Image (spheres, grey):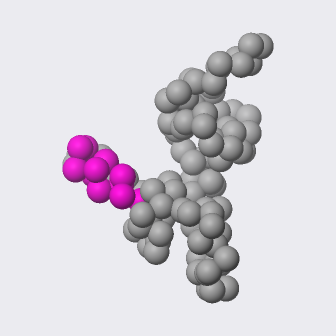
Amino acid sequence: TDDCIVMQEFRDARPEWTFVSECDNASEANGFVYKEMKLWSEEQTDAHFNKFIAEMIGMASARYWIGVATTNVSYWVYFMRSLDATDDSFIWADPPRVPGLPW
Protein backbone atom coordinates (compact mmCIF):
# COMPACT_ATOMS: atom_id res chain seq x y z
CA THR A 1 0.00 0.00 0.00
CA ASP A 2 1.14 3.55 -0.63
CA ASP A 3 -0.41 4.71 2.62
CA CYS A 4 0.92 2.62 5.48
CA ILE A 5 -1.25 4.37 8.07
CA VAL A 6 -4.13 2.05 7.14
CA MET A 7 -2.26 -1.01 8.36
CA GLN A 8 -2.83 -0.16 12.01
CA GLU A 9 -6.50 0.53 11.26
CA PHE A 10 -6.79 -2.93 9.66
CA ARG A 11 -5.05 -4.59 12.60
CA ASP A 12 -7.27 -2.78 15.10
CA ALA A 13 -10.42 -3.68 13.17
CA ARG A 14 -9.52 -7.37 12.78
CA PRO A 15 -7.13 -8.41 15.56
CA GLU A 16 -7.79 -12.10 14.82
CA TRP A 17 -6.41 -11.73 11.26
CA THR A 18 -2.75 -11.77 10.34
CA PHE A 19 -1.78 -8.84 8.13
CA VAL A 20 1.52 -9.11 6.31
CA SER A 21 2.85 -5.89 4.88
CA GLU A 22 6.08 -4.35 3.73
CA CYS A 23 4.79 -1.24 5.50
CA ASP A 24 6.26 -2.66 8.69
CA ASN A 25 9.70 -1.94 7.21
CA ALA A 26 8.85 1.22 5.25
CA SER A 27 9.95 4.78 5.72
CA GLU A 28 6.99 6.18 3.76
CA ALA A 29 4.50 6.00 6.61
CA ASN A 30 2.32 8.79 5.26
CA GLY A 31 2.16 7.57 1.70
CA PHE A 32 4.03 7.79 -1.55
CA VAL A 33 4.42 11.30 -2.95
CA TYR A 34 5.76 11.28 -6.51
CA LYS A 35 7.18 14.82 -6.32
CA GLU A 36 9.32 13.86 -3.31
CA MET A 37 11.18 11.13 -5.23
CA LYS A 38 13.69 13.64 -6.58
CA LEU A 39 14.78 14.30 -3.00
CA TRP A 40 15.45 10.63 -2.20
CA SER A 41 18.90 9.18 -1.82
CA GLU A 42 19.89 6.11 -3.81
CA GLU A 43 19.25 3.98 -0.71
CA GLN A 44 15.74 5.43 -0.23
CA THR A 45 14.95 4.84 -3.89
CA ASP A 46 16.14 1.24 -3.68
CA ALA A 47 14.12 0.68 -0.48
CA HIS A 48 10.98 2.09 -2.10
CA PHE A 49 11.22 -0.13 -5.18
CA ASN A 50 12.10 -3.21 -3.12
CA LYS A 51 8.93 -2.60 -1.09
CA PHE A 52 6.87 -1.92 -4.21
CA ILE A 53 7.99 -5.06 -6.06
CA ALA A 54 7.63 -7.25 -2.95
CA GLU A 55 4.09 -5.95 -2.46
CA MET A 56 3.15 -6.62 -6.09
CA ILE A 57 4.46 -10.19 -5.87
CA GLY A 58 2.58 -10.69 -2.61
CA MET A 59 -0.65 -9.28 -4.02
CA ALA A 60 -0.35 -11.31 -7.21
CA SER A 61 0.19 -14.55 -5.27
CA ALA A 62 -2.41 -13.88 -2.56
CA ARG A 63 -5.31 -16.29 -2.31
CA TYR A 64 -7.72 -13.34 -2.19
CA TRP A 65 -7.06 -9.79 -3.26
CA ILE A 66 -9.17 -6.64 -3.03
CA GLY A 67 -8.09 -3.68 -5.14
CA VAL A 68 -9.26 -0.35 -6.41
CA ALA A 69 -9.60 0.44 -10.08
CA THR A 70 -8.26 3.97 -9.64
CA THR A 71 -4.62 2.83 -9.62
CA ASN A 72 -2.61 1.21 -12.37
CA VAL A 73 -1.00 -1.06 -9.77
CA SER A 74 -4.30 -2.96 -9.50
CA TYR A 75 -4.20 -3.74 -13.18
CA TRP A 76 -0.55 -4.85 -13.03
CA VAL A 77 -1.35 -7.17 -10.14
CA TYR A 78 -4.44 -8.56 -11.90
CA PHE A 79 -2.37 -9.57 -14.93
CA MET A 80 0.50 -10.88 -12.77
CA ARG A 81 -1.81 -13.42 -11.10
CA SER A 82 -1.50 -17.10 -11.94
CA LEU A 83 -3.60 -18.45 -14.76
CA ASP A 84 -4.96 -20.88 -12.15
CA ALA A 85 -6.30 -18.02 -10.01
CA THR A 86 -10.04 -17.70 -10.37
CA ASP A 87 -11.58 -14.34 -11.16
CA ASP A 88 -13.65 -14.50 -7.97
CA SER A 89 -10.47 -14.34 -5.88
CA PHE A 90 -9.74 -10.85 -7.25
CA ILE A 91 -12.27 -8.28 -6.12
CA TRP A 92 -12.55 -4.65 -7.23
CA ALA A 93 -13.63 -2.39 -4.36
CA ASP A 94 -14.75 0.11 -7.01
CA PRO A 95 -15.26 -1.86 -10.24
CA PRO A 96 -14.35 0.02 -13.41
CA ARG A 97 -17.28 0.75 -15.68
CA VAL A 98 -15.80 -0.27 -19.01
CA PRO A 99 -18.15 -1.88 -21.55
CA GLY A 100 -16.98 -5.29 -22.68
CA LEU A 101 -14.67 -6.03 -19.73
CA PRO A 102 -15.58 -9.02 -17.54
CA TRP A 103 -15.62 -7.06 -14.27
**The magenta stretch spans residue 11:** yes
Tell me if 70 is positioned left or right of 1 in this view. right
Q: Nearer the viewer, residue 8 or 61?
A: 8
Q: Is residue 54 visible?
A: no
**The magenta stretch spans residue 93:** no
x, y percent for residue 21: 44, 59
Q: Which residues are magenta?
A: 4-14
65 above or below 38?
above
Figure quadrant of the C terminus? top right
Res 72 → quadrant: top right
Q: Nearer the viewer, residue 22 or 62?
A: 22
| Furthest residue in direction right, as rendered | 100
Residue drawn 59% across the image and 71% down it: 36
Residue drawn 36% across the image and 52% down it: 6
Res 68 → quadrant: top right
Give the main secondary structure of the magenta stretch. Answer: helix
